[in-house]
């Protein structure tokens, strides 16, 4: 007789692997499928920045979840490293968000004010002069900065692999299969049709990133998860290591990774999909790097990365049960923040599966908002 799992997870990126990790940790039987290798989608190409202050959201929703997910990283990554035998290369350093224009200064001031009101995650405004005292290699183009006492960057590829391997050690079965359809029985989804064979489960969780669209159509949701291309570069640098996680105000990062390479980027492109990494994007990244830290002209580019962020129609994640059909959950559309939000998403889906509710505010991510759209 065919095995029937408690949960079948479609997609072994950071989000699906996290769902498999938390569900199997709680004793559920789990099948984790991916049409390619584990961590071969967006999660392989991310910066892995866990930056709580990136999204300025006066509604608090996403910021609160980022904060909660950071707590899970602190709490659970040591166990995930140990169980999987894979070091996720977490690097914890102070962060600096560098303003190069007057409008960016205003944004930094608003963020400092916002975080001081919420008193959860410190973010201090500093002048350009104060900023250069922290690292005299920073250029005079920097007019001000936001200082964050501690923040984390992680190797997103290794992290995703470590989650999947930990899930496997907890009993998850991993299959290299492409899901091509859902098996239904009356008002319930009871399994997944793959290109080769069928896998049955009481609950199915769609975590297939930009590959989710055919399944969303089948579920009657008139929406697409759109790819937003991002390119970054990795550089080897023999000078003094960077003591901060540097970033721009709305985008850009400059981070010394745990593998000793410096990562810089990332672009946001809704085109050039078929093009491999391109020189124009690399040039744009280097222009920003030179404008904040000119000494890095001595660094050597050793790798150019690109991937596709899974963007939902309203740029918010889609996480939760689909109200129109039993046994089906979505965890997709995490956009710029899928590595950071992966752990809290896995914990949320696990709670929905085991208790029927989650201990977080998840209403704003409800898949039901797209029904009839
Ligand atoms: C350049 C860049 C920088 C980024 N930086 C950051 C950052 O600093 N911090 C952050 O939090 N996020 C960052 N992100 C965003 C982050 O990478 C994504 O939000 C996250 O990886 C999404 O994870 P996922 O598991 O939803 O999707 P994916 O990692 O894409 O995983 C989906 C998986 O589903 C599989 N799949 C698809 N269709 C099927 C199917 N039919 N059957 C079976 N399997 C299927 C795919 O093969 C894939 O492995 C960045 C992204 C990019 C591109």
Image: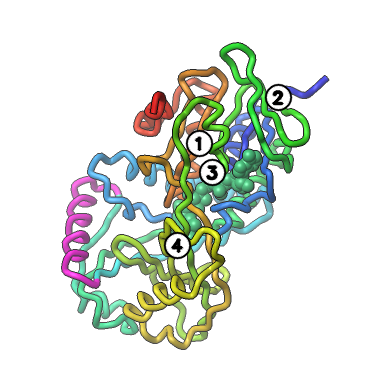
Residue 136 image position (x, y, % from top left):
31, 84
State the residue at coordinates (44%, 35%). 223
- Which residue is tagged 4? 92
Residue at the extreme right: 1
- Which residue is tagged 2? 200
* Label 2 beta carbon less than 8 Å to ligand 1: no
**Sequence-wise first label, 1 or 3:** 3
Q: Most prominent secondary structure in the magenta stretch?
A: helix
Looking at the image, which is closer to me, 331 or 24?
331
User: The magenta stretch spans which residues?
Assistant: 100-120
In-image side of 123 versus 39 (left or right): left
**Sequence-wise first label, 3 or 4:** 4
Q: Of the numbered discs in the image, which one, if any, rests on residue 139?
A: none
Which callout, 2 or 4, points to the residue nearer the camera? 2
- Which residue is tagged 1? 331
Instruction: Classify the position of the C terminus by image quarter.
Output: top left
Question: Contact, CB < 8 Å: mark 1 with mark 4?
Answer: no
Residue 161 image position (x, y, % from top left):
64, 51
Cα gap from disc 1 to disc 4, whole angstroms = 28 Å
Marks counted in the figure total 4
* Label 4 beta carbon less than 8 Å to ligand 1: no
Residue at the extreme top: 186
Cα gap from disc 3 to disc 2, whole angstroms = 21 Å
**Sequence-wise first label, 3 or 2:** 2
Cα gap from disc 2 to disc 1, whole angstroms = 19 Å
Q: Secondary structure at mark 1?
A: strand
Q: Of the numbered discs in the image, which one, if any, rests on residue 209?
A: 3
Question: Contact, CB < 8 Å: mark 1 with mark 3?
Answer: no
* Label 1 beta carbon less than 8 Å to ligand 1: yes
Position of residue 122 relative to residue 66, above or below, is below
**Sequence-wise first label, 1 or 4:** 4
């Amino acid at each position: 007789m065919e095995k029937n799992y408690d949960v079948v997870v479609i997609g072994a990126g950071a989000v699906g692997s996290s769902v498999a990790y938390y569900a199997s940790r709680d004793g559920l039987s789990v099948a984790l499928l991916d049409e390619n290798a584990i961590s071969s989608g967006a999660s392989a190409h991310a910066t892995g920045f866990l930056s709580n202050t990136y999204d300025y959201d006066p509604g608090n929703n996403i910021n609160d979840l980022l904060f909660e997910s950071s707590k899970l990283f602190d709490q659970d990554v040591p166990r995930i490293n140990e169980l999987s035998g894979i070091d996720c290369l977490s690097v914890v350093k102070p962060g600096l968000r560098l303003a190069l224009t007057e409008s960016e200064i205003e944004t930094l001031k608003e963020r400092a004010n916002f975080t001081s009101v919420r008193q959860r995650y410190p973010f201090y405004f500093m002048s350009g002069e104060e900023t250069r005292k922290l690292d005299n290699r920073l250029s005079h183009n920097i007019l001000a900065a936001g200082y964050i006492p501690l923040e984390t960057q992680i190797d997103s590829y290794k992290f995703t692999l470590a989650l999947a391997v930990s899930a496997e050690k907890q009993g998850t079965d991993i299959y290299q299969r492409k899901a091509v359809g859902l098996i239904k029985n009356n008002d319930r989804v009871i399994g997944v049709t793959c290109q080769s064979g069928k896998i049955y489960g009481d609950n199915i969780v769609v975590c297939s990133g930009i590959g989710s669209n055919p399944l969303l159509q089948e579920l009657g949701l008139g929406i697409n998860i759109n790819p937003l291309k991002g390119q970054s570069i990795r550089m080897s640098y023999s000078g003094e290591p960077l003591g901060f996680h540097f970033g721009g105000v709305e985008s850009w990062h400059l981070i010394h990774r745990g593998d000793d390479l410096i990562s810089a980027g990332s672009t946001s492109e809704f085109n050039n999909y078929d093009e491999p990494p391109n020189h124009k994007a690399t040039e744009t990244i280097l222009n920003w790097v030179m404008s904040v830290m000119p000494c890095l002209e001595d660094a050597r580019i050793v790798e150019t990365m690109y991937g596709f962020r899974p963007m939902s129609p309203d740029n918010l994640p889609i996480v939760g049960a689909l109200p129109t059909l039993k046994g089906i959950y979505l965890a997709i559309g995490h956009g710029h923040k899928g590595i950071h939000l992966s752990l809290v998403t896995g914990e949320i889906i696990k709670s929905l599966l085991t208790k029927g509710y989650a201990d977080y505010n998840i209403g704003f991510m409800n898949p039901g908002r797209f029904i009839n759209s």
